[in-house]
């Protein structure tokens, strides 16, 4: 079952009298339960594609269709938490209305526990570290029980061990709920670690779109992983990638 | 190790040094008076001022004037809040309407409220209404501007987040815009309260039969400079008390606003 369908998406921005073609005829279908990672260098149109797919921006050409009845969830690059609410309140706000928050208090508790925020439920955003704040933002999206998650480099500001921990938590949550996800990143390792499918974007066009059949849990130092990373890097116009030193996860 | 950041503690040293400065100034003032360095008619000693203050407090005169002024401020300031807050939300929600009214609002904002006293007395008479109108005029603009600037400085990315979780326009206003602008609104309220207090004392000096402004003017006519100073010090002390009270209330009811201030500091 297709959750999201993009057909002929085009978008041009005008800045300083210049026209910048951000997206040029992008087609994409995202089936239920698939985690598709959109990867590409800065300015390749990844974020614009995600925003159009999520309905936050309108395309100039083409159509973005979310299957009827599909409930979306969003995780932005920054946590975007409300300073006036505690961590618990910021998760609860994802339910969309005061009434839903009253009725869904137990669900909020579950998500808060699931993401390891139990000890911080009464903390305000200014008291939270970057990792905790981003976890709250993830909780705000998950509490809606979304059918599809749109994620724009949500872990890019975090240090490597924390990023890996949140990536693993995300994979576990998505797998348990069969949630589809469109995940944007410029990090090839993150793309290959997370994705069921990698969509490489360059100059606003899809230059590669393929399933990632590496077994899970994925070992980023394996020759298969490194080979795929090199190949993807070449597609995107970069040189071969050296395998990264494995970071110890605390 | 906890990932939660620690809260900053209140600077006690600051309070101690403030106390030392106040006590030192009073001591110097008293010493200058005792040594005959000052003219007792122009500047009475702190002890004389204190005695006048205690006498007025004991007779109930001070309480009566403070209550009269306090009630006027409470009524006028309350009315200003009721008018300014929705006006700011309306101005923010309807930018075209707001630009149409901008010249008039800027014009009114720049008129010192005391300059309007004669007009207000003509329009509302010499009773309470003219004083209330003066307080409203004095405190409306700080509250209005504080609210408007708070609403205008809300991060648009938060609004987008609100849309992404399905909030309506009203939901975005009520759940995101207003709470996020609270620190700026609180600032406007604090300023407005100070302005209303100043305007009130001025109004009471012009036309009143009670209140701190009247008490000071009456004492001047009776050549009781010690009572004049007692009145001035009472106004200042009440200003400090009100400001501290407002700050304590905002710490109690808006703890996050203070945490954010420390966070950005």
Image (cartoon, rainbow, N blue to C red):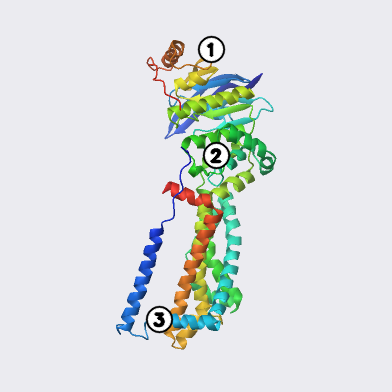
Q: Quadrant of residue B26?
A: bottom left
- State how far apart marks 3 and 1 are (Cα): 89 Å
Mark 1, Cα crowd under 10 Å, few <14 / some 14-19 / many 20+, is few
Q: Position of residue B237 (x, y in %)?
A: 46, 71
**Which residue: 39% across, 17% down?**
A238
Q: Which residue is mark 1?
A: A213
Identify the residue at the far front of this view.
B1
Q: Residue at x 50, y 27 (%)?
A: A165
Residue A22 horizontal side relative to residue A33, left or right: left
Whether pointer 2 and pointer 3 mark residues with C-beta atoms closer than 8 Å, the reply is no
The x and y percentages for residue B251 are: 52, 55
Residue B59 percent coordinates (x, y): 54, 84
Give the side of residue B134 with respect to residue B49, left or right.
right
* Mark 3 closeness class: few <14, some 14–19, many ≥20 residues within 10 Å: some
Residue that label 3 marks: B47
Please name the residue that numbered disc 2 is placed on.
Answer: A119
Does residue B38 sit above or below B13 in this rendering? below
Q: Nearer the viewer, mark 3 or mark 1?
A: 3
CA distance separating discs 2 and 3: 56 Å
Mark 1 belongs to which subunit?
Answer: A
Figure label count: 3
Q: Residues within 10 Å of mark 2 (few under 14, many from 20)?
A: few
Q: Are marks 2 and 3 on the same chain?
A: no
**Along the viewing direction, whichever of A186 and B121 lies nearer the viewer:** A186
Q: Quadrant of residue A100?
A: top right
Question: Reading the chain from its start, which is encountered first: label 1 or label 2?
Answer: 2
């Amino acid at each position: 079952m297709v959750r999201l369908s993009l057909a002929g998406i085009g978008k041009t921005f005008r800045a300083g009298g210049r026209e910048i073609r951000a997206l040029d005829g992008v087609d994409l279908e995202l089936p239920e339960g698939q985690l598709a990672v959109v990867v590409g260098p800065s300015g390749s149109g990844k974020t614009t594609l995600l925003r159009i797919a999520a309905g936050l921006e309108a395309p100039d050409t083409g159509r973005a269709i979310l299957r009827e009845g599909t409930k979306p969830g969003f995780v932005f690059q920054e946590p975007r938490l409300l300073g006036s609410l505690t961590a618990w309140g910021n998760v609860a706000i994802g339910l969309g209305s005061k009434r839903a928050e009253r009725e869904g208090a137990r669900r909020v508790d579950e998500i808060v526990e699931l993401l390891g925020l139990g000890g911080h439920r009464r903390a305000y955003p200014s008291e939270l570290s970057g990792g905790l704040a981003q976890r709250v933002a993830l909780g705000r999206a998950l509490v809606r029980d979304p059918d599809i998650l749109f994620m724009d480099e949500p872990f890019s500001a975090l240090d490597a061990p924390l990023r890996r921990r949140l990536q693993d938590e995300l994979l576990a949550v998505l797998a348990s709920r069969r949630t589809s996800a469109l995940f944007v990143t410029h990090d090839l390792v993150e793309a290959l670690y997370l994705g069921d499918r990698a969509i490489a974007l360059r100059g606003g066009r899809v230059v590669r779109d393929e399933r990632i059949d590496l077994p899970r849990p994925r070992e980023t130092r394996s020759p298969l992983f490194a080979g795929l990373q090199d190949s993807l890097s070449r597609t995107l116009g970069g040189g071969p990638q050296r395998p990264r030193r494995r970071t110890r996860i605390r | 190790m906890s990932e939660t950041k620690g809260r900053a503690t209140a600077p006690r040293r600051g309070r101690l040094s403030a106390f030392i400065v106040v006590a030192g100034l009073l001591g110097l003032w008293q010493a200058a008076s005792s040594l005959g360095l000052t003219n007792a008619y122009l500047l009475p000693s702190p002890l004389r001022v204190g005695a006048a203050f205690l006498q007025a407090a004991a007779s109930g005169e001070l309480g009566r004037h403070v209550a009269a002024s306090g009630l006027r401020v409470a009524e006028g300031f309350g009315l200003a809040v009721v008018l300014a807050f929705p006006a700011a939300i309306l101005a923010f929600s309807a930018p075209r309407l707001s630009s149409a009214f901008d010249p008039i609002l800027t014009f009114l904002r720049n008129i010192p409220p005391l300059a309007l006293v004669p007009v207000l007395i003509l329009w509302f008479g010499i009773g309470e209404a003219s004083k209330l109108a003066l307080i409203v005029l004095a405190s409306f603009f700080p509250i209005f501007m504080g609210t408007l600037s708070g609403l205008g400085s809300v991060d648009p990315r938060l609004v987008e987040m609100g849309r992404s979780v399905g909030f309506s326009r009203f939901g975005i206003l009520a759940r995101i815009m207003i709470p996020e602008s609270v620190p700026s609104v609180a600032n406007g309220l604090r300023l407005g309260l100070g302005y209303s207090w100043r305007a009130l004392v001025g109004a009471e000096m012009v036309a009143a039969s009670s209140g701190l402004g009247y008490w000071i003017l009456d004492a001047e006519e009776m050549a009781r400079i010690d009572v004049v100073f007692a009145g001035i010090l009472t106004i200042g002390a009440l200003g400090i008390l009100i400001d501290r009270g407002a700050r304590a209330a905002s710490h109690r009811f808006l703890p996050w606003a203070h945490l954010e201030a420390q966070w950005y500091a």
